[in-house]
Amino acid sequence: MFQLGKTIVSEEILERDFVCNLSACKGNCCIDGDAGAPLSEEETKILEEIYPKVKPYLRPEGIAAIEAQGTWIKGTDGDLETTLIEGKDCAYVIFDGATALCGIEQAYNEGIVSWKKPVSCHLYPIRVKDFSEFTAVNYDKWDICDDACSLGKELQVPVYKFVKEALVRRFGEDWYLELEKVATDLKK
């Protein structure tokens, strides 16, 4: 672990390799698990605002879940998260054949909304947890991502480089440049 500003960062994000391999995992991170994607308060407001524009991209069961539960929910631990369909799939999941994709991201890619998706999804396999004095930045090992780890190792892409855009989105360009300096120093 090391400190960058008000973040405590796991060295695993520098040491581990990762590149999403949708052809192998089929987007299972959006349909497996026991909770929706973590959200910030600001993101809950964005979901409420963009839902009418995203709705045409969603599956009927996703729309039904959102209209019954809301565009976001408070999880059993009190954290804010995306709505689930019957406790499983994220309500915003759509499918391209057998591959799970994000309906929000699809609307973003088509220029319908200006918000890509929850930053927690964009950051994965990094998980961020805010505490009163600092923010923890950790690597999340999940067996459904074994193929992504293998592909990352083959391509020699460390986690922090794979999620660069998301890290800059969450922490800013200066923070990311400092992270790169730490990575370079650790290799020496």
Image: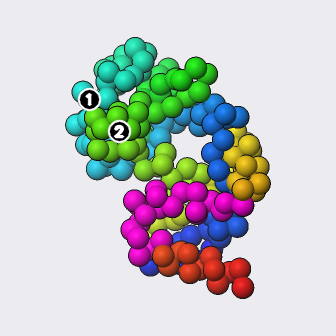
**Location of residue 32 in the rendering, given as x and y in whole percent from the top left corner:** 60, 32
Q: Amino acid at mark 1?
A: Lys
Q: Residue at x 63, y 64 (%)?
A: 13
Tell me the residue at 70%/34% (across/down): 24
Which mark, by number, is residue 120? none
Question: Which part of the image, by quadrant, shows the N terminus?
Answer: bottom right
Q: Is residue 40 above or below residue 50?
A: below
Q: Main secondary structure of the magenta part?
A: helix
On the picture, is 152 further left or further right than 92? right
Q: Position of residue 102 (x, y in %)?
A: 46, 33
Colour logic? rainbow
Quarter of the image where one finds residue 52: top left
Mark 2 is surrounded, within 10 Å at the Cα level, by few (under 14), some (14 to 19) or many (20 or more) other residues, namely some
Q: Say whether residue 25 is left or right of residue 168.
A: right
Label 2: state its secondary structure. Answer: helix
Q: Nearer the viewer, residue 163 or 2?
A: 163
The label shown at residue 108 is: 2
Badge 1 or badge 2: first in the primary sequence? 1
- Amino acid type assigned to the residue bearing label 2 in the image: Tyr
Q: Specify the segment rendered in magenta.
A: 156-176
Indicate the secondary structure of the residue bearing disc 1: helix
Magenta stretch encompasses residue 26: no
Frontmost residue, 157 versus 13: 157
Q: Which residue is mark 1?
A: 53
Residue 94 visible in the shown view: yes
